[in-house]
Amino acid sequence: MALARALAVAVVGVTGHLVEVEADLGTGLPGLTIIGLPDAALQESRDRIRAAVTNSGQPWPDRRITLGLFPATLPKSGSAFDLAMALAVLAADGQVPAGELRTRVLIGELALDGRVRPVRGVLPAVLAAQAAGVERVVVPAGNAAEALLVPGTVIEPVADLRGAIGLVRGLQPPGPVPAPAGGGQADEGPAAPDLAEVAGQSVGRLAVEVAAAGGHHLYLQGPPGSGKTMLAERLPGVLPDLDPAAALEVTAIHSVAGLLPAGAPLVRRPPYRSPHHSATAAALIGAGSATIRPGLACQAHRGALFLDEAPEFSRTALDALRQPLESGVVEISRARMTTRFPARFQLVLAANPCPCARARAGGVTCECPSAVRRRYLGRLSGPLLDRIDIQLELSTPTRAELRADLGQADSSARVAARVADARTAMAARLAGTPWRTNAEVPGATLRHAWKPAAKASRAADRAYEAGHLTARGLDRVLRVAWTLADLAGLPSPTEHQVNQALSLRIPVWAR
């Protein structure tokens, strides 16, 4: 037989596309040609698969070999096609049954000695195989636990090419699947610090609780020692666990990014990312030419992205976050492809009031001229801040405030319980809609379907008429008011919740 076909998957972004690998053995000078828009890593697989086949005890066909990857218009990248191409060549040479290859998707990188190495993006690849109706997926043994996260698909792990050949010949069963440690849940690292440790900042703790409950973005401004970083670092500890659908979304992103630990891949806790202020727009959003990898904002999907010392980030990097804050999606366009990543994250910004950081809310003067101070905070553009639901100005707590708050603040566990109850109330109200939290509800829907009573929203309407709120800012006040009502167990926001939501935004004239 001179022609054989195998199945593989190309992962673009976090979406898998079924690829047919055709191997043709023709006459002419011996050689191997790969067609179908392969990248450099895929072109190098010519030498990898030949060495792997010969080192696995199989003869290499001394023919002119053409490997075609279809659809030909879809760019292919990476080394995950190695196993499919090697077995397609052997099937075309009659060394393995060709019919067995058409019932399986083959994923894996080949080492020169024939070992099948783990690759990125196995979870979205298995999901794509299942969507295409392929019931069996051959994966590297190191990716078996990740592949098993997809129910209803037969996973056949292999450790080397010899094992894969024996599998398709029906001579040996697939390798054993290691039992995932911790029930398949990824190690999330040390536990988040307790919110009760932030003494003297009752309003700041409330802002964190409201942000966690409603999925709101948060901006904290204040001098050093006011607790900005402490509050932000405690946000992950009060966020609820991811539901099964969100956990698979997040795990797929981390799989493509190569961040999943071996043996326990499922991400159940909301991710948290805190990059240094030297991070570029490409690092935040994602970058690449042939292969585009998710950036930090995408890695924080369904979790939190904390930018400490936010004015120190470049203006380009900060403004690159504006579009995903609205849409929840990052779309990266290159000459050969357009890649979309989900990026529904909570943005947390922290900033000093001026470069010297001595200015305080109480009127203490600093060494910075007013123009320098305006230019410093001006790096946070108005359109970016307008997308932040909660904007709070913090001051350094006094000794009396610290003593009064000592031992009185609620722990993260108690706050997390209230957040979970509020999320339950949101889920009941938003049932049947594509939104999960109040922060995701579009303004038009909010004003028509869940508009507070006219008396309750009087203060917000006055702030809008006076120019202190934009139309987008008014929508965000109403969203926060709904979250406050959910935390209080109320069916809708009252005047108290709307006024409280207004107080959780720094007025325009205070910036």
Image (tube, rainbow, N blue to C red):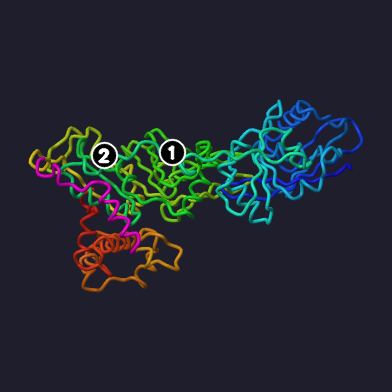
Task: Magenta stretch: give its range.
Answer: 403-425
Placement of 19 over or under 49, stated as above or below? below
> Per the image, is 287 magenta?
no
Q: Hey, what amino acid is under mark 1? A: Asp
Q: Hey, what amino acid is under mark 2? A: Met
- Mark 2–mark 1 Cα distance, whole angstroms, equals 23 Å
Question: What residue is shown with label 2?
Answer: 230
Closer to the chain start, of discs 2 and 1, is: 1
Q: Is residue 370 visible?
A: no
Question: What residue is shown with label 1?
Answer: 187
Disc 2 to disc 1: CB gap under 8 Å: no
Q: Is residue 262 visible?
A: yes
Could you say which is closer to the camera, residue 256 or residue 102? 102
Q: Is residue 91 left or right of residue 432?
A: right
Q: Position of residue 152 (x, y in %)?
A: 61, 54
Q: Residue at x 68, y 30 (%)?
A: 115
Q: Is residue 32 left or right of residue 325?
A: right
Q: Residue at x 44, y 54 (%)?
A: 243
